[in-house]
Structure formats: structure tokens, C-alpha cells
Amino acid sequence: MQIEHWHSDHDGPLSELALRHKLERRGYQVTRYEYSPGMFFPAHDHADDKIDAIVSGCFRITMQGQEALLMAGDLVVIPKHVIHTAEVVGDEPVVSFDAVRLS
């Protein structure tokens, strides 16, 4: 699983706007979502390569037999047609960016 963490020394202070700009500079169209505590996404896939980036909260993703907890500033690359699950962990909502590469 390809995960990247926010590095303040390289990326600057973490903010919603800074994380959005990081994804947009990489050529992604970014959509913001907020998920309630307990939200669970059963096994599914996507037709496009995408990135999920966490603005706030804690998000668990399981993909190809691996599990990761994503926190603010973390992002995960989700290749197209790869089955995965995701869920909000804890009592706080998750604010995340769904990023799809522009054609």
C-alpha cells in the first residue's frame, strides 16, 4: 500500500488549503467529503486511479491484505480496480479529499 505522510519541513504547515494545493499541483481534481463517526465503506473498487487524503480525523483503509490508519496529512494511492474497504475510526468525523487525476 502506497502511503505518504505530511512533512512540515518540506510541505509547510498542514492546512486544508495546503493539502488541496498539494494534490492539485500533482494534476488531480479534488473533491471534499465529510464522513460521520462509524461510517463504513464495504469492499469496492473505482474505475480510475485515485488518492484519498485525510484533512482531519482517523480513517482505516484495508487493501490487498494490508491495513493502515490514516491521520491528518496522510494520503493513500488507490489504484483503479483494486478492491478495498474504509471506515471512520473514533468519535470524530473524517474530512477527506477524494482526488482523481485530470485527463
Image (spheres, rainbow, N blue to C red):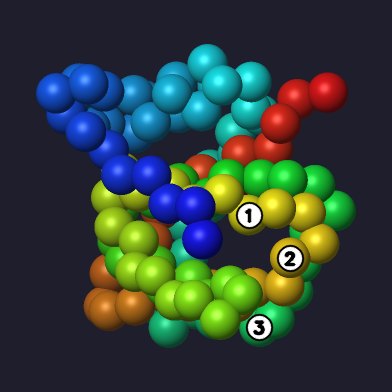
Q: As rendered, which of 79 and 103 lies closer to the eye?
A: 79
> Are the two marked residues, 2 and 1, in contact with CB atoms closer than 8 angstroms?
yes
Q: Which residue is mark 1?
A: 78
Q: Residue furthest top?
A: 25
Disc 2 versus disc 1: distance between alpha carbons?
Answer: 7 Å
Which residue corresponds to the image point at 73% horizontal and 45% vertical from the top-left? 49
Q: Which mark is residue 82?
A: 2
Does residue 64 sit above or below 71 in this rendering?
below
Which amino acid type is marked by label 1? Answer: Ile
- In what element is the residue under mark 1? strand
Badge 3: few (under 14), some or many (20 or more) residues near its Cα, within 10 Å?
few
Which numbered tag is attached to residue 42?
3
The type of residue carrying mark 2 is Val
Q: To which quarter of the image does residue 101 belong?
A: top right
Q: Residue at x 51, y 44 (%)?
A: 97
The secondary element bearing badge 3 is classed as: strand
Q: Secondary structure at mark 2?
A: loop
